[in-house]
Amino acid sequence: MSGIHEAAALVPQSGLDGEFWSTQGSNLLLAAISIVAFIAVVALVMFGADLVRGRIRDKVQLVVLITPVLVLLGIGLVYPVIDTVWLSFTEIVKEPDPVTGINTETSNFVGLQNYIYAFTDPTVFRTILNTLVWIVLVPLLSTGVGLAYAVFIDRAKGEKALKSLVFMPMAISFVGASVIWGSIMYDYNETGAQTGMLNAVLGTFGIGPINFLAEEPWNTFFLIVILSWIQTGFAMVIISAAIKGVPPEINEAASLDGANSWQRFWRITVPSIRGTLVVVMTTITIATLKVYDIVRTLTQGRYNTDVVANKMYVLSFVEQRQPLGAALAVILFIFVIPIVIYNVRSLQKVKETR
Amino acid sequence: MATPAPAIPDETKQPKSKAAKAKENLTSPWATGAAIIIAALWTIPTIGLFMTSLVPGDQYRTEAWWDVLLSGDMTFENFGYVLFNSFGDSSSADPLLGNLMNSIVVTVPTVVFPLVIGLMAAYAFAWIPFKGSNFLFVFIFALQVVPIQLALIPLLRLLGPNGVGIAGEFPGVWLAHTIFAMPLAVFLLHNFIAQIPSDIIEAARVDGASHTQIFFRVIIPLSLPAIASLAIFQFLWVWNDLLVSAVFGSINTYPLTYPISNLAGSYGATAYLVPPAAFISMIIPLIVFFSLQRYFVRGLLAGSTKG
Amino acid sequence: MSIKRRYIAPIAATAIAGLALAGCSSSDDPDTSDSASGGGGEMMEGCEDYADYGTFDGGEVEVYTTITGVELGQLEETFTDFSSCTGITVNVVSSDEFETEINIRVDGGNPPDLAIIPQPGLLQTLVGTGTVIPASEAVEANVDEFWSADWKQYGTVGQTFYAAPLMASVKGWVWYSPAEFADNGYEIPATWDELMTLTQTMADNGGAGPNYKPWCIGFESGTATGWAGTDWVEDIVLREAGADAYDQWVTGELDFASPEIKSAFEKFGDIALNTDYINGGLGGTQSIVDTSFQEAGLQILESSCSLHHQASFYEAQWPEGTTVAEDGDIWAFLTPPIAEGDPSAVTGGGEFVASFRDAPEVDAVQTYMSSDTWANIRVSLGGVISANKGLDPTNASSAIGQQAIEILQSDDTVFRFDGSDLMPSAVGASAFWTEMVNYVQGKDLDTVLADIDAAWP
């Protein structure tokens, strides 16, 4: 038998008939009309607010400018946040009805119990430690390599092409990237020929094979490499733009003073783009906190590689232990507070000096 | 007040100053070598993906792509398979080309909506002093970290059949993506807009310009590079999303990431089609990147030379 | 969606026409299918089987499932004639993140019309939310007629019957090469001890392939890595401790740390932790975790191992050109009972169809899927089996499928559902899997068992 092979033998059916194209056409049209209508409405409201006369005009315009974002965030994110914080202090007791099987849910306030569990259960606590390693290494690696690359290729021949090479991983989804690294780069066979590129290369030097995803504690580092591989493109592109914004006169003056390129890099380039570096690292750090797909696809948290975001996903949606998942989510929030404070201070300085 | 004006300089027309030459010196052989090494390291996995996508299905599991390359069995058949054909003998599922189109229909509006709304809010937070402005901005900034998974169920209740009833259709997917994109869009655009030299804005205010007028005449033209950069990133993030599309979409709206993740399932029988499908999904984002790349001359945050 | 049907209908019609099923005559002229979906009202030729479901004018039903790939296409094909005759469009939507997405969709108030649920434990969770509609009388009548009481019970939560069984698989087959057995004079073991003796003999004799070991085992399965190991333990528990102990174990009355369950782990460990016995062609114990469950058994073809424990669906993994038959390249025997004379007991899996929308067209589809008509059509398309008693075993696409159907339909067989699918997902879809992995990697058994017990909610 084998349904699969029978099926593969049949000629696949092409689905590209007239109706396919008319559906696609009407979808594209819907998108186009929606965009135009959206911009038209925004413009109309803004110009409408401009017709208001007198002192109230500024206030009306302020309301017009910030209302959309507040409404969207209010319905989409603020309510879930409040709900999550509350959930993290509760436990849900489900009592199934003996006849219908339908649960009666009661939610009890349990104080810090879920948090105590998170910090005392060794597997959960390990995810917190791992996440700390991730949020230190991923921003450093991506920003470091991105900065170095941006400086090296600045004004070099074929700069745009060189940029696209490092930018390319940005075009791959986290799951896609995990599949590439897991099955093409890191693949490991204990015996026989190696089909993973890294082990095949190592093998020609007589090393290995190495089971990259199982060797503790390096496996976490190998997973971090994947996210850094993706995020470097983001860092590089933004930093490169910032470098081009450094006034040439400063470099010129330094050069005349006899500073070599290494000194100019540390004394001029880096301080000049400090603000950009902070924003890039902030964005990457926050993205890193949320990434669960890589761990979920490659190790499912085995070999002590789990991170908070994945554990939260598993607890909330696989194991249906939502209050615990909520507590982990709140712990993620707490990780971000120092970053928020640092950024707010930087911003305040900018506002004061302008 | 050393913040440079975030106008778009046309570097090709700039006369080569001494400084530019001094900068070129930095491009020493050592730097060139390092750049080539980084470029190579970053490209190798993608090349591996491409080569693997040329491996025929029956050799996918057992043979490495370089062995298949040497034996001359490589084929482009897999690409045609994923793009134009349904899978199996009778699947009524659309070929991936349909999902590719859906990806475009999902992505383009969800780039425009958050950019426009984010730009409006970013201007207000950066340049209109009002009570609670700082608090609100910090709050929005902090919302970035809300894991999307937690927000799915409450928002689905609102958009689903018991609420507005647009879940499963494109507008529902657009709205969900727009909401989840807001905090980062406001944060990044604010960073750029806040560093527009105050003289420009103040001059306009003295001339009696309203906020609406400043927004359209000053902010938007000056922010074009930031808008273009954020547009690219927002495009990539939405393009590569699976979770939001899976929850708020339906079979009529599923983007490319959806069938790709399913290809890996089914006891692995179609796993050999994952590399070509993943490769195809990279092509359009790269085209977008190439076409918008010139705006990166002074890209996102280009003004933020002071911290 | 319905557009594609025009292309499919001719193929499906040919396929079904060739089946010669009693009472199943298909639409003679596929071109009429289109007019049927639009027309509503009048009865068409070849639609006798579908007359009871009525006709609908443009009803649409979404069926949500974990099934992807070729099997998805086959599933969709089962609705071709049904759709042309009743006018109901059936949209099959599949996702490999079904188990998490279904919870989100249900909690978010946007459930599918019908869901094909692969675990009774998940069904219980979903019923708990109050969104699942109890099965209609027509569905229940079909299930009473065509399924055993055990199967009906798996679709029942509390005392209410919710979901009709759909397809099934028999687990616990041991795949082997009949030629190798004949050449070496190996006999099919009748007891567990004979199996272990056979294993030792094989280890002593060795084999032709590189790194030969008697067994090959693979646990890797993406986010579900480890489930292949739970199948082993379940098979041994059912055979050694018996059906009653098995039932207590899956409901949590019997701890993992209890002697019955510990003994089953140890029996599995006798094979999986013995480097003389595993892992043929693949390496040591670590390779169990790194090797995907699809690939492990293929070592038999390389003569690197002789035995591979996996469910009936493993048949689809053998490469093209492999004959799966008693006298072919590959065949399988059921994991033997522990002692001679023990009742024949098998574990297995299956799917259940639950409804979330109370509408006549949804009910019609659910009823159809619980009928013998559906089971015969689906099984004839190949690759799967069903425990539906109205199923003609000769429709199965393979000898192993026929044998599995006979086992399922036999009144002498003690059938128990895959235990991990019945346990709460914190154990059955999480801790049990991960601790199986830890066990083969050398974690102390008592700790393994205690850790699984700790995860029980």
Image (spheres, coloured by chain):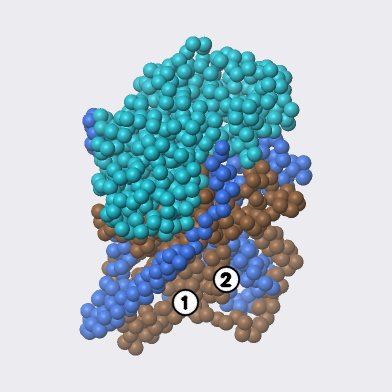
Chain colours: A blue, B brown, C cyan
Q: Which residue is under mark 2?
A: B290
Q: Where is residue A122 drawn, in percent x and y?
A: 46, 34
- In the image, what residue type sits under mark 2? Phe
- In the image, what residue type sits under mark 1? Leu
Q: Where is residue A141 drawn, in percent x and y?
A: 58, 55
Badge 2, how many Cα within 10 Å: few under 14, some, many 20+? some
Dot placed on the residue nearer the N-terminal end, 2 or 1: 1
Query: What chain is tagged by disc 2?
Result: B
Q: Which mark is residue C191?
A: none
- Quarter of the image for the N terminus of chain A: give it: top right
Q: Where is residue C133 drawn, in percent x and y?
A: 26, 41
Report the Cα–Cα distance between label 2 and label 1: 17 Å
Front of the two marks 2 and 1: 2
Q: Is residue C268 left or right of residue C255?
A: right
Q: Residue at x 69, y 70 (%)?
A: B26
Q: Which of C340 and B158 lies nearest the eye of the viewer? A: C340
Q: Residue at x 22, y 84 (%)?
A: A53
| B125 lies above or below C14 | below
Q: Which residue is under mark 1?
A: B224
Q: Which of C200 and A179 lies nearest the eye of the viewer? A: C200
Q: Which of C128 and C41 lies nearest the eye of the viewer? A: C41
Q: Residue at x 56, y 23 (%)?
A: C333
Q: Secondary structure at mark 1?
A: helix
Query: What chain is tagged by disc 1?
Result: B
Residue A239, can we see it?
A: no
